[in-house]
Amino acid sequence: MDVHSAIADRDTVPTEVTDALRAGIPIGDAKLQALNLVVTPMVDARGRPCEDDLATFLAAGHSEAQVLEVILAIAVKTISSYTNHVFDTPLDKVFAGRAWEAASD
C-alpha cells in the first residue's frame, strides 16, 4: 500500500483518492469507485466477481477490455506481494512518507 500510494502521488492521482482507498471509504469519483468495487470482490472471490459487480463496473464507463486489465493488475500485484512477503522486503526509505499498516479487525 505504501509504495503504490507514493507512486500514485507521483503520477498525480489525487491524495484524496489514495487516502480513501487506504481508509476503506468511498472514493468521490464514481468511475474510480466502480473500479474499486470490482477489484475488491474479484480478489476476495478469487477471480469470480458477481454479475452485479461487473455490471456496475461497465455501467460506470469501463470496458470489457478494462476487466482484463484489472485481472492483469491483480496478477502482477499478487506476484509482487507474495515475493515481498516471502523475503520480508523492507520498505525503501523513499516510500516511508506513505507507510501504511492495515487496520486490525
Image (cartoon, rainbow, N blue to C red):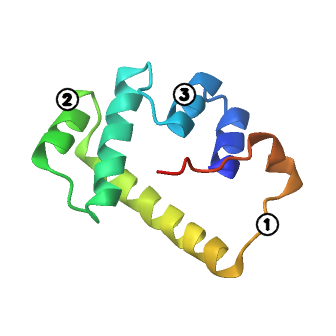
Residue 59: image tag: 2
Q: Secondary structure at mark 2?
A: helix
Q: Please say if the residues under marks 3 and 1 sit with CB atoms less than 8 Å apart.
A: no
- Is residue 21 shown left or right of residue 60? right
Q: Earlier in the sequence, mark 3 or mark 1?
A: 3
Distance from label 3 to label 1 (Cα)? 25 Å
Q: Position of residue 67 (x, y in %)?
A: 29, 49
- Is residue 29 shown left or right of residue 56? right
Q: Position of residue 3 (x, y in %)?
A: 69, 51
Residue appearing at x 27%, y 28% in the figure: 61
Q: Secondary structure at mark 1?
A: loop
Tell me the residue that label 1 is attached to.
90
Amino acid tagged 3: Val
Distance from label 1 to label 2 (Cα)? 40 Å
* Name of the residue lying farthest toward the left: 51
Q: Earlier in the sequence, mark 3 or mark 2?
A: 3
Amino acid tagged 2: Ala
Q: Position of residue 47 (x, y in %)?
A: 27, 63
Distance from label 3 to label 2 (Cα)? 20 Å
Depicted 82 relative to depicted 45: above or below = below
Foreground tag (3 vs 2): 3
Depicted 60 relative to depicted 76: above or below = above
Q: Position of residue 105 (x, y in %)?
A: 46, 51
Image-quadrant location for residue 56: top left
* Name of the residue lying farthest toward the front: 105
Residue appearing at x 11%, y 47% in the figure: 51
Q: Nearer the viewer, residue 17 or 102?
A: 102
Q: Is residue 43 visible?
A: yes
- Is residue 32 shown left or right of residue 12? left
Q: Is residue 66 visible?
A: no
Tell me the residue that label 3 is attached to.
17
Amino acid tagged 1: Pro
